[in-house]
Amino acid sequence: MRCCRVMAENNDPGANQQPRRKTISSPYIHRLQRRHFLLFDVLPILGTAGAFAFLAIHPFGTTEFVLLFAMWLVTGLGVTVGYHRLFTHRTFKAAPWLAGVLAVLGSMAGQGGVVSWVALHRRHHEYSDREGDPHSPNLSGGGLRGTLRGLAHSHFLWMRRHEYPNVVHYAPDLVKDRGLVRIARLYYYWVGLGLLIPTVIGGLVSLSWTGAVSGLLWGGLVRIFVLEHIVWAINSFLHMFGTRRYASRENSHNGGIFALVTLGESWHNNHHAFPESPSFGLAWYRLDPGFWLIKMLEKCGLAWDLRTPSAARMAAKRISGKSDPVGNAA
Ligand SMILES: [Zn+2]
Ligand SMILES: [Zn+2]
C-alpha cells in the first residue's frame, strides 16, 4: 500500500494552473515535503527513543498500552479502510458522515492529507515498479547494493523529496468533494488532535503531568512510528519478498503472517491483482481486519456496493502450480 506525503491541499498553486500535467515539481512543494518528512517521519523516531528514555520517570502501564493499541487500531483502520479501500480504490460506498470520520482518522496517522495520499497511491498503481512509481524498491540497480538502496528508498527516503502527483489529474473525484477537501486542508490539525487525545487521557487517568507526557509519547509518537513502518514495509519489502498468488505486472507479494498487524494490507499481491476488491484476503480464512470492519459496516447499513471480484475472475488470474508458503495456503 502506499502511502503518503505532502499536502498540497494546503494551497498548491501549481495544481490548478497545470491540470494536464501528471506531476508537479516546485521549490514550494519540495519545502512542504521536507517539512512533512521532518515533522511526521523523523520526529516519531526521536519520540520513540524519547518514550523509552521516559520510562525512567513514568512506567509503561495499562493506560499506555491501551492508548498505544487503541490509537494504532483506529488510525490504522482510517488508513486502510478509509484512505485506501474507500477513497483511493472506491471498493465500496459509505455514508458521507462515515467517510468523513474515516478521512479524519486516517489523517491522524500523519501519512499525508487524504487527497495527496490518494493521488500518490493511484500513481503507485499506475506505474507500479516502473519509472514513475513514487516508491518502488526495484529501480535502484541490481546486486546487494541496489537491493539495499531500493529498500531504503521505498521504505523511507522517497518521502524527503519527490514528484508531486497532480491531484486534479489523479483525484478529480476527491477534489470535487468539498467536505473532503475541507478535511484535507485541516490535515495538520487532525494530526495535532491525534496527539492531543492520548495526552489528555494520559494526564486525566494518572492525574499527573508525567502521565500526560507518557500518553503523548506512547499514544501519539510511538503509535505514529509503529503504524508508519507497518505501512512503509508494504511499499518496500512486499514489493520484493513474499509469495505471489495472482499474476500481476508488478512485483507485489503477499505476506500472510503479517495480515493481522497490517489489518489485511499485507495481502498486497492480491490487492494489486484486484484493486477494486474491498477484501484483500479474498477468502474468509485469510485474515483481513480491514475487510471485517467493512462487512460490519455493511450489516449496519453504513456501507454498500462492495465490489468483490467473481470466482471466475480470480481463477483466471491465479498463478497455477504455485504454493503459498507464507501464511495461508491456496
Ligand atoms: Zn492500492
Ligand atoms: Zn504496491
Image (cartoon, rainbow, N blue to C red):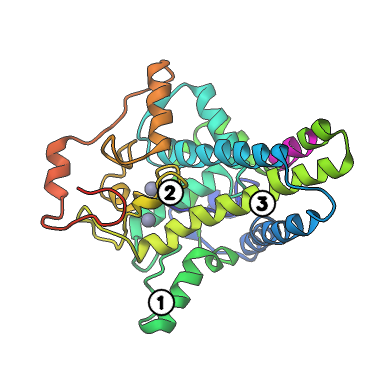
Q: Residue at x 17, y 35 (%)?
A: 310
Left or right: where 218 falls relative to 242: right
Q: Compute the Cα span from label 3 to label 1.
A: 28 Å
Q: Looking at this view, is 47 or 130 the one in front?
A: 47
Could you say whether the residue bearing mark 2 is in a helix, strand or loop?
helix
Q: Which residue is mark 1?
A: 147
Left or right: where 286 falls relative to 25: left
| Percent position of residue 41, x then y | 63, 59
Q: Is residue 309 magenta?
A: no
Q: Is residue 198 magenta?
A: yes
Could you say whether the residue bearing mark 1 is in a helix, strand or loop?
helix
Nearer to us of marks 1 and 2 is: 1
Mark 2 packing: few (<14 Cα in 10 Å), some, or many (20+)? some
Residue 141 occupies which quadrant of the picture?
Answer: bottom left
Mark 1 packing: few (<14 Cα in 10 Å), some, or many (20+)? some
Up the image or down, 12 lies above or below 172; here it is below
Q: Residue at x 47, y 59 (%)?
A: 233
Q: Check residue 169 in the rendering and tell me which mark sits there, or answer none.
A: 2
Specify the amino acid type for callout 2.
His
Q: Looking at this view, is 12 or 247 the one in front?
A: 247
Q: Which residue is mark 3?
A: 222
Left or right: where 223 falls relative to 146: right
Specify the amino acid type for callout 1.
Thr
Nearer to us of marks 2 and 3 is: 3
Mark 3 packing: few (<14 Cα in 10 Å), some, or many (20+)? many
Q: Which residues are magenta?
A: 192-200
Q: Residue at x 54, y 22 (%)?
A: 97
Q: Compute the Cα span from label 1 to label 2.
A: 32 Å
| Percent position of residue 56, x then y | 82, 56
Could you say whether the residue bearing mark 3 is in a helix, strand or loop?
helix
